[in-house]
Image (tube, rainbow, N blue to C red):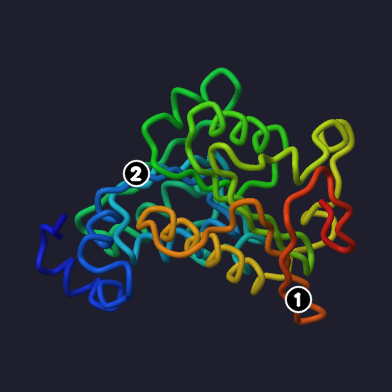
């Protein structure tokens, strides 16, 4: 498998030089189709890096509009974007970074009725939302479709990233579904969000996506990476049923 465009080959020179990637891996990226659910604080760094890596087609699901308080952590957007749809503004901002690819905004919430139709035919899905009913719908749908799900979360100074892959541990190994749906836990809207951590976790999600698409390395399957920004630590734990992770439980 070879890259079709000489300018793409030039832009991806540093990726092509990586052991295990090469032109074949870069070509896999340009041929890939991914879905990103949410266009907020985690999505904007992930989208920037994935567009720069020239992932071929990105479907971006978000029906929210931009508010002023978003700007400190959702760094794709500007003051002039307030009131516009996040998915559309993200597409406009990133179009020049992927001249041979595309970002397709979908201004629609994923539900149990439409998720399978909308997420089918994607190679990887990223869930960056903070809406728990949507998160469980996306996870369940990816499991049925056999599509890897890159999952991230940031609340206050704490972050998580993992990959739910076909045949591996799923979202119920990380989150108590019944408790979360009946009484949602920690929330960035209440506790705040440390904006640099969004960049760290969103970048990690982009990295896991590129690893999955190119087949390199050891993705975070069956493991969860945990950030404690105040303590300046990053640790890893295996996925087990409903872990009580001090300081990071959502």
Residue 45: % across, % down: 50, 65
Looking at the picture, does residue 81 appear above or below residue 72? Answer: above
| Comes first in the chain, label 1 or label 2 | 2
Look at the picture and state if 236 lies above or below 186.
Answer: below
Q: Residue at x 11, y 57 (%)?
A: 4
Regarding residue 185, the answer to whether it shows in the image is yes
Name the disc covering residue 29, or none: none
137 relative position to 8: left or right: right
Label 1: few (<14), some (14–19) or many (≥20) C-alpha neighbours in 10 Å: some
Q: Which residue is labeled 1 in the image?
A: 229
Residue corresponding to mark 2: 33
Above or below, 155 against 125 in this view is below
Q: Position of residue 167 (x, y in %)?
A: 57, 37
Picture coordinates of residue 26 (x, y %)?
26, 62
Q: Nearer the viewer, residue 102 or 3?
A: 3
How many marks on residues?
Answer: 2
Which picture quadrant has residue 71?
bottom right
The front one of 31 and 60 is 31
Distance between mark 1 and mark 2 Cα atoms: 32 Å
Contact between labelled residues 2 and 1, with CB atoms less than 8 Å apart: no
Residue extending farthest top: 113
Which element carries disc 2, helix, strand or loop? strand
Task: Look at the image and tell me in which quarter the N terminus lies.
Answer: bottom left
Identified at 14% across, 59% down, the residue is 2
Q: Is residue 77 visible?
A: no
Q: Name the side, left or right, on which 234 lies relative to 77.
A: right
Name the residue rendered at 34%, 44% in the picture. Answer: 33
Question: Which residue is outermost to the bottom?
Answer: 232
Position in image of residue 110 (x %, y %): 56, 30
Compared with residue 117, is residue 125 higher up or lower down, i.e. above or below?
below
Q: Secondary structure at mark 1?
A: loop
């Amino acid at each position: 498998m070879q890259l079709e465009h000489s300018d793409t080959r030039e832009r991806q020179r540093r990726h092509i030089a990586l052991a295990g990637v090469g032109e074949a891996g870069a070509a896999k990226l340009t041929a890939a189709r991914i879905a990103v659910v949410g266009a907020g604080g985690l999505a904007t760094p992930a989208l920037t890096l994935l567009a720069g890596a020239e992932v071929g087609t990105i479907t971006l699901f978000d029906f929210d509009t931009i508010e002023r308080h978003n700007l400190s952590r959702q760094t794709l957007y500007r003051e002039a974007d307030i009131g516009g749809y996040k998915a559309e503004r993200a597409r406009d901002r990133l179009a020049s970074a992927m001249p041979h690819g595309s970002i397709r905004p979908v201004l629609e919430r994923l539900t149990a009725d439409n998720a399978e139709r909308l997420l089918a035919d994607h190679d990887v899905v990223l869930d960056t939302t903070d809406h728990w009913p949507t998160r469980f719908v996306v996870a369940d749908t990816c499991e049925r479709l056999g599509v890897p799900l890159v999952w991230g979360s940031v609340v206050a100074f704490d972050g998580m990233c993992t990959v739910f892959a076909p045949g591996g541990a799923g979202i119920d190994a990380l989150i108590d579904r019944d408790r979360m749906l009946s009484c949602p836990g920690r929330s960035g809207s209440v506790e705040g969000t440390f904006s640099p951590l969004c960049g760290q976790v969103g970048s990690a999600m982009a990295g896991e996506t590129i690893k999955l698409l190119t087949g390199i390395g050891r993705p975070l399957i069956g493991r969860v990476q945990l950030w404690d920004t105040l303590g300046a630590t990053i640790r890893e734990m295996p996925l087990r049923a409903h872990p009580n992770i001090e300081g990071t439980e959502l």
